[in-house]
Amino acid sequence: MPISKPIIDEILALNEKNYCSETEDGVCVRIAAIADFPTRFGHFQIVAFFNNWDEEEHVAILNGDVHDKENVPVRLHSQCLTGDAFGSLRCDCRDQLISSLEFIAKEDEGIVIYLRQEGRGIGLLNKVKAYQLQDMGYDTVEANVALGFEDDERDYMMASHLLKCLEVRSIKLITNNPKKIDGLRKQGVDVVDRIPLLIEPNDHNKEYLRTKFEKSGHFLDELF
C-alpha cells in the first residue's frame, strides 16, 4: 500500500509549517512534493525535498507506507552519473541501484534515498580527473588522495534529515559499506540491521571492488 492521500497531506502540512523551525543545527529540510512513480523496476512514489544546506535536490523513492514504521529497508545511494545514467562498467553503482529498486519493490515497505553526492562527494569534474589518474595506474583511493580529497567525502546528515521528514523510526540499511552505517548512526538514525548488496565483478570494475574491500573495508568477503 502506498502512502494514502490524507497521510501525504498531513506530512506535507507538518513539513511546511514545523520541520525547519525545529532543527537545532540550522538546517532546513522539508518535503516539497510527493508523486506517483511507475518504473520498469516497480511502482513507487517519489518524494522531492527542499533544503537550505547544500542547495542540491535530493529525492527518495518509496514503496509502501513508510510513515512511522520500524525496520524499513533503506538503500542510501549517492548519485553516479557515469554509472546510473550512462551504464559505465568502471563501477557497480548502476547495478546496485537497480538491485535496490527491485528489492524494495518486493517488500511491504522500502526506500531508496538518492543523494546528489557525485563521485563519493568530490563532484563530477573531479571524478573524471580521478578516472584519468586511474588510467595511469592509481587505484580509486590513491586517485582521490592525489586530488587532495579523502577516500570518501560523503556526508550523511542530509540523509538523516530526509528520514526524519518521512518519520521513519528505524531502518535496515542495504549496503556493503560500514562507513554508511556509522555515518547514519552518528546522525541519530537507528540502523538496526544490514542487508548485503553483492554485485558480481566484471573485467572493468574488479580492481575497483577489490580496493573497496581491501582499503575501504567494504563487506565484500564473498567476492574476494
Image: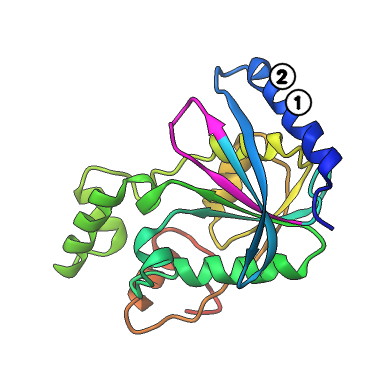
Please name the residue that numbered disc 2 is placed on. 18
- Identified at 72% across, 32% down, the residue is 12
Task: Report whether 1 appears left or right of 50.
Answer: right
Q: Secondary structure at mark 1?
A: helix
| Residue found at the far left of this picture | 136
Residue at image x 56%, y 74%?
Answer: 198
- Magenta stretch holds residue 62: yes
Q: Which residue is mark 1?
A: 14
Q: Residue at x 22, y 42 (%)?
A: 148
Q: Which residues are magenta?
A: 50-63
- Left or right: 151 with respect to 155? left
Query: Quick check: marks 1 and 2 in contact, CB under 8 Å?
Result: yes
As helix, strand or loop, the secondary structure at mark 2 comes to helix
> Badge 1, how many Cα within 10 Å: few under 14, some, many 20+?
some
Residue 93 image position (x, y, % from top left): 45, 66
| Quarter of image, res 50 | top right
The quarter in which the N terminus is drawn is bottom right
Residue at 56 percent across and 42 percent down: it is 183
Colouring style: rainbow
Residue 40 point in image, percent of width and height: 60, 73
Identity, as a three-letter code, of the amino acid under mark 1: Leu
